[in-house]
């Protein structure tokens, strides 16, 4: 039990900091930006009914009070993060142990499957508690009432047990940890998509009851609390855990219920080199990434037209200007704003590709490869080029599909502008491939974890920096600050080239160091 | 004179504060079958990692056919095939795909010979690696390595996980390889594996090569152990050449026989023997017995006769 808590320490601390900071920053910023009731009413009228914004943050019930605003802004984002936390916690506990073979050792001892399962989930719940406390503290620091803050914290954190339950079920189904995370990520994305549908499409409000993220909204902290809604997530969690427990007793350790056939006629294409083989093995995963990004891009393009609504107060425009775009009054501006999330997605993808590289080494398959006449340089550079090409494909789809969606929805946006937005994604992708590659070669065991952390920090730095008043040079420390958010802002080609160049140089250095170091196992 | 297949010169490897390999000097000529023995943790796997250029030597150097293993691994590996102690393969690929992939990376294999090996080792090629048992995965590795007909075969505990039938198949393949002039470097902690195939043996302990020679020269390695139980108390036996006796119980005696077995049986035949078990000592026992403490001393006195 203690082990399970121990393992999750770093991740939990990271999330706790994240929660506390966001809660504080958003609340404080609101009080700062809209001190009078009048400004708040204007804000409520224009901004809140703006579908595009609602997509991001969910539906707001009353933004005239600081509490209502926080429930909307903070609650909206944090419940997604809580979902991710719950998922990762469950998968880590249930799957990483098995894949490492440690599960068999533990189970051979006095610990039954049931106990191991429960211990792991309890550790995640404890983490959820920590998150709730952090959010509560942040909200209080921002000046909100105690009871309301507690309820809001609870409604955000309630996503953790539900998604931990989903994570538990997914672990029983997927044959490998990676697939479990991919399936679970798909579930989070689906929940988010359902919330988007519920909040933006008129008449589909009932869909909100189908998704756990919608339940967080329905709890309506600060705006007429409905605690009875708490029953839903509780019931869902219990149901999911029971299902997972049942599946757990049914399957074999080390595999999942969804394994594909174990025999197959040989398919001998794409086996001529290490890069070709890597491409072949990564193909399905890549297809999912491209598919998912394409669908999201298309949908976002579709609703871009609805952002046009006049009368956005100047204060708000200033805030958004600081955030990076000119405002959200035109579809182009909206798309520019939204593309930040695609940039984040591509950055995460980039690091995940280098993480796959590290897996080859930690699973010692790299030993098998390098004992053949395969040069380290060609192996690593081949895979990095593959990663960059994949990132380019994803970026291209994001740009093109969002244009297609926008055009179908009737908005007038240029293809060139959105392809430039895609180029932003690609440049950041190349940058993080390079950084992750360098970390992989310098710090084999911890490198990829640190790389993921850097992506998150870089993204948040820009987000938080835009909301708080920090000097420009501080904000410029993150690569995200150097992007010109096309099509809303002018395209900053030279900045992109610099970012990409840094990425290439880092990758080169990474390859050089890798050629010189010992192979390091798990 | 042809370049030695393996040559190491004062090869040393340190991991942090641990000295894993201490000034190893090896010279293995082409065509030899060399057994590399040592208990777990002696440094055998470290040696192989250095020979393959997977780890970098702290000092000294290793060469395969005259090519530096760390600086030019790709050139060196063209003449080398490696079988790891544990099979590290791609779970979603089938056996056939793995063999094809590894073969192509090596620069081509003899397809007929590969098919013959698949039959000999009775491997189901169409099963995905994740569905294969450890022994079967080991077979995939073995076949991949043997089918390259590489000039040097580096084998790290190759029969761990193989059942005795497949162990025989393995020995047959090694004999074929040796007959063809291939060099074999077999690292193991199992004596019988080495005995069956190698003509020269090196013994590694705590990172140092403490003994080396042909098997007949290291005759003390082939001692037989007799556990004799008597009907009554242990009798006094006349001292016999090449026999060491130790009393293990009031009625039992353990005899380590390195010399002739005949006189021992004669001596025992005239006593009241209730039970007799004979076995070969494991490497661990040999080490405890012969190399405890005075590492270099024993080999000088007991080895060369």
Image (cartoon, grey):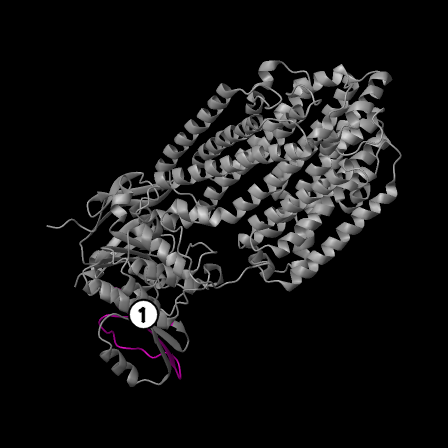
Q: Nearer the viewer, residue A142 or A292?
A: A292
Residue at label 1? B169
Q: Quadrant of residue B240?
A: bottom left
Residue occupying the point 25% across, 44% down: B75
The kind of secondary structure element at disc 1 is helix
Residue occupying the point 48% across, 64% down: A263
Q: Nearer the viewer, residue B41 or A171?
A: A171
Query: Residue farthest to the right?
Result: A224
Q: Nearer the viewer, residue A364 or B195?
A: A364
- Residue B146, position as x, y percentages in the image: 29, 60
- Residue A79, position as x, y percentages in the image: 73, 37
Start-end of magenta stretch: B220-247
Q: How many marks?
A: 1
Report whether residue A134 is seen.
no
- Residue A16, position as x, y percentages in the image: 68, 34
Q: Quadrant of residue A34?
A: top right
């Amino acid at each position: 039990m203690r082990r399970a808590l121990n393992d999750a320490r770093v991740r939990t601390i990271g999330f706790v900091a994240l929660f506390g900071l966001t809660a504080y920053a958003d609340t404080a910023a609101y009080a700062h930006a809209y001190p009078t009731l009048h400004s708040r009413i204007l804000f409520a009228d224009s901004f809140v009914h703006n579908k595009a914004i609602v997509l991001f943050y969910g539906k707001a019930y009353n933004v005239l009070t600081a509490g209502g605003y926080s429930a909307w802004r903070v609650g909206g984002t944090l419940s997604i993060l809580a979902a991710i936390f719950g998922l990762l916690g469950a998968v880590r506990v249930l799957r990483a142990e098995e894949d490492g073979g440690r599960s068999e050792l533990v189970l051979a001892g006095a610990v039954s499957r049931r106990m191991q399962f429960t211990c792991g989930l309890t550790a995640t719940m404890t983490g959820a508690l920590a998150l709730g406390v952090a959010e509560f503290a942040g909200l209080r620091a921002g000046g909100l009432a105690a009871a309301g803050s507690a309820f809001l914290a609870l409604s955000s954190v309630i996503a953790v047990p539900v998604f931990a339950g989903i994570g538990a079920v997914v672990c029983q189904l997927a044959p490998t940890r990676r697939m479990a995370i991919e399936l679970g990520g798909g579930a989070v994305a689906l929940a988010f998509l359902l919330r988007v549908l519920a909040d933006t499409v008129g008449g589909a409000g009932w869909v909100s009851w189908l998704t756990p993220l919608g339940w967080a909204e329905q709890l309506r902290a600060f705006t007429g609390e409905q605690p009875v809604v708490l029953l839903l997530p509780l019931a869902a969690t219990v149901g999911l855990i029971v299902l997972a427990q049942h599946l757990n007793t049914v399957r074999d350790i080390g595999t999942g219920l969804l394994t594909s056939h174990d025999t197959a006629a040989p398919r001998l294409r794409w086996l001529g080199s290490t890069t070709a083989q890597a491409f072949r093995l990564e193909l399905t995963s890549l297809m999912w990434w491209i598919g998912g990004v394409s669908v999201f891009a298309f949908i976002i393009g579709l609703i871009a037209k609805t952002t046009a609504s006049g009368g956005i107060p100047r204060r708000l425009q200033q805030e958004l200007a600081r955030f990076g775009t000119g405002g959200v009054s035109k579809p182009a501006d909206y798309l520019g704003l939204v593309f930040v999330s695609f940039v984040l997605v591509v950055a995460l993808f980039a690091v995940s590709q280098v993480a796959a590289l590290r897996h080859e080494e930690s699973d010692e398959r790299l030993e098998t490869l390098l004992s053949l006449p395969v040069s380290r340089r060609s192996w690593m550079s081949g895979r990095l080029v593959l990663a960059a090409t994949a990132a380019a494909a994803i970026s291209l789809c994001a740009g093109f599909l969002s244009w297609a969606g926008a055009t179908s929805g009737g908005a007038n946006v240029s293809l060139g502008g959105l392809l430039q937005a895609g180029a932003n994604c690609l440049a950041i992708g190349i940058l993080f491939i390079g950084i992750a590659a360098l970390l992989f070669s310098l710090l084999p065991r911890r490198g990829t974890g640190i790389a993921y952390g850097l992506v998150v920090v870089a993204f948040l730095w820009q987000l938080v920096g835009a909301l708080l008043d920090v000097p420009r040079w501080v904000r410029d420390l993150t690569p995200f600050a150097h992007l010109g958010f096309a099509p809303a802002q002018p395209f900053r080609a030279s900045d992109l080239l610099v970012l990409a160049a840094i990425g290439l140089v880092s990758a080169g250095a990474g390859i050089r160091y890798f050629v010189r170091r010992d192979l390091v196992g798990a | 004179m042809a370049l030695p297949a393996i040559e190491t010169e004062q090869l040393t490897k340190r991991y942090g504060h641990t000295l894993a390999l201490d000034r190893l000097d090896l010279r293995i000529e082409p065509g030899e079958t060399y057994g590399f023995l040592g208990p777990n943790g002696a440094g055998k796997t470290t040696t192989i990692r250095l020979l393959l250029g997977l780890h970098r030597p702290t000092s000294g150097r290793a060469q395969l056919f005259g090519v530096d293993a760390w600086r030019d691994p790709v050139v060196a590996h063209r003449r080398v095939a490696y079988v790891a102690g544990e099979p590290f393969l791609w779970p979603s690929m089938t056996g056939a795909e793995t063999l094809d992939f590894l073969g192509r990376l090596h620069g081509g294999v003899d397809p007929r010979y590969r098919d013959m090996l698949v039959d000999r080792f009775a491997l189901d090629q169409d099963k995905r690696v994740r569905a294969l048992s450890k022994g079967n995965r080991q077979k995939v590795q073995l076949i991949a390595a043997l089918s390259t007909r590489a000039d040097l075969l580096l084998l790290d505990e190759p029969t761990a996980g193989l059942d005795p039938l497949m162990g025989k198949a393995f020995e047959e393949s090694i004999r074929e390889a040796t007959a063809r002039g291939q060099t074999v470097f077999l690292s193991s902690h199992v004596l019988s594996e080495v005995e069956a195939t190698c003509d020269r043996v090196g013994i590694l302990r705590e990172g140092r090569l403490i003994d080396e020679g042909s098997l007949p020269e290291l005759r003390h390695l082939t001692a037989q152990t007799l556990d004799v139980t008597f009907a009554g108390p242990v009798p006094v036996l006349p001292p016999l050449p090449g026999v060491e006796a130790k009393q293990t119980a009031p009625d039992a005696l353990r005899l380590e026989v390195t010399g002739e077995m005949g006189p021992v049986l004669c001596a025992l035949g005239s006593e009241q023997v209730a039970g007799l078990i004979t076995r070969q000592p494991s490497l661990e026992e040999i080490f405890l017995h012969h190399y405890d403490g005075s590492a270099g001393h024993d080999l000088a006195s007991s080895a060369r006769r």
